[in-house]
Amino acid sequence: MRPAWWLPSLTEAVFASVLFWLLAAGHAKALLADGDTGWHIRVGDFILAERRFPTSDLFSFSRPGAEWFAWEWGSDVLFALAHRLGGLGGVVLLAGLVIAGTSAALFYFLAWERVNVIVAVIAMLAAGSASTVHWLARPHVFTYLLFVLSLWILEADRRQPGRRVWVLVPLAVLWTNLHGGFVVLIVLLGLYVAGSLVEARRSSARRYALLALAAAAGTLVNPYGPRLHFHIAQYLRSDFIRDRVEEFQSPRFRGESIFVFELLLVAGWMIVPRLWRRREYAPALLLMVLSHAALVSVRHVLLYVLAAAPVVAREATTILASRQNEWWAVLSSLGHARSSREIGRPWYWPPLWAAAAVLTTAGLFQAGGARWKVDFPAEKFPHNALAATEKKGLGRRIFTSDQWADYLIYRYYPQTRVFIDGRSDFYGAAIGQQYLEALSAHHRWQEIFDRHDFDVVLTPPEWPLATVLKAHPDWRLEYDDGQALVLRRVWRTPVVSAN
């Protein structure tokens, strides 16, 4: 019996469910928990207004006019367009669509792997749960979607070679202009070259090597050419950034998300020997390399879980099916789709239910009233402190946290410039070290303040700098709500001797 044409496919159901969950009350603002979204929007605004790509800094007074790469300009423009159409709600909706699309693509990939539907749902939910650690309205969401699609294309080609794999070349061009994570595509192709060599499939190794070269050449199609690649290489090699920037740190094994990642990590390593015995070297190498990357940097956790979920789910289906017990028979009957059309429509079939989910959600954002008015979360950003400070003026040079500076850029650019913001690749170790010494009230803090001529400080109360400034005669506490302090420099008239 064929399913009715009007019923949603399971992939559409996954897409709609994740989208509604993301944008439900209490979840939408979590996508704005990182202030970087603010300056990404303003970069997109600049490109749309000026019709050119920035080559020098737009936002700081600490490095005015210094060379800068807007290396995620494509995502910035998309965020700016979404912001023009729907404010921050539009930005959240765009990020939600990409995240929901990633979950749907992963589920379809699992179904293509012949995974039992119930096992596929569990694996998709596990990958989603582990991924929430970095579900944010930032350009990296495009990397996770493109990574799933690239891995699927390569796995399909490994099993049945065809010309469709060359679509990865234009995809590399697109990826490069959306997010710096395009590097993972070249790594992925390199692992498939290595896997083919170990399998003694020299023709496949040559083919993947040519594909890797073509994709690498495609990454040069960006506003900055090869200079972008040198910049990214320098950025990734920076010890200061690796040691200081939180998302480059190893994951902290606390909380539900990291616990699920830990389960997938253990399952993946248990499966590697089975893959090796079956001569599936490329997937085995991928799990090993990405597990190392995820343990070194929390930002790679999502790449690992997206790569591990299909392999773990496929092996789980095979192992459970081999048991041939009554429990598995029930699970198999429940998790058996009667036709591929129940999983997902063909590419030429209009995704009616997915489109309906998008339109319904967009309508709620536009017409849902105060419930759908999204802003950066008040518990993380100093809304009230800034509102109070605006009455007396923000000051010429504000010292604040990099995250709060991102928010300042969003609210006050181009009138306001900042000392440092979330662009750690731009500021580097010199400004970064001054920032850390100042906030910790290092013995050089006053020298740093005098050098940059700060006149206002917007600080969390727990910073050592806040305690020092409250007792300093040259600074006056102007506002304190327990979340943020505003201190203003007292400019004293020098006393002139009568002689």
Image (cartoon, grey):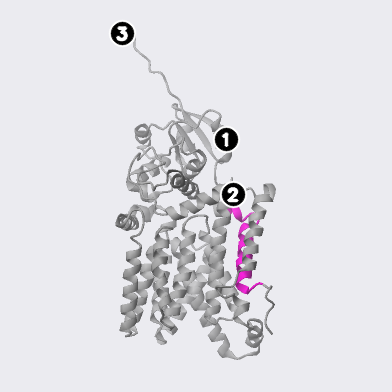
Q: Tell me the quarter of the image containing the C terminus.
A: top left
In the drawing, does residue 333 fall left or right of residue 306?
A: right
Say which mark, if any, is on residue 86: 2
Residue found at the far front of this picture: 348
Verify CB contact (< 8 Å) between mark 1 and mark 2: no
The image shows residue 130 at horizontal and vertical percentages of 53, 66
Count neighbours of disc 2 (C-alpha within 10 A) and say few if under 14, some if 14 to 19, many if 20 or more: some
210 is higher (above) or lower (below) than 424: below
Query: Sequence order check: which comes first, mark 1 or mark 2?
Result: 2
Residue identifier under label 3 = 499
Count neighbours of disc 3 (C-alpha within 10 A) and say few if under 14, some if 14 to 19, many if 20 or more: few
Span of residues in magenta: 8-30
**What residue lies at 39% left-to-right and 65% top-to-bottom?**
172
Residue identifier under label 1 = 387
The residue tagged with tag 2: helix, strand or loop? helix
Amino acid type at image mark 3: Asn
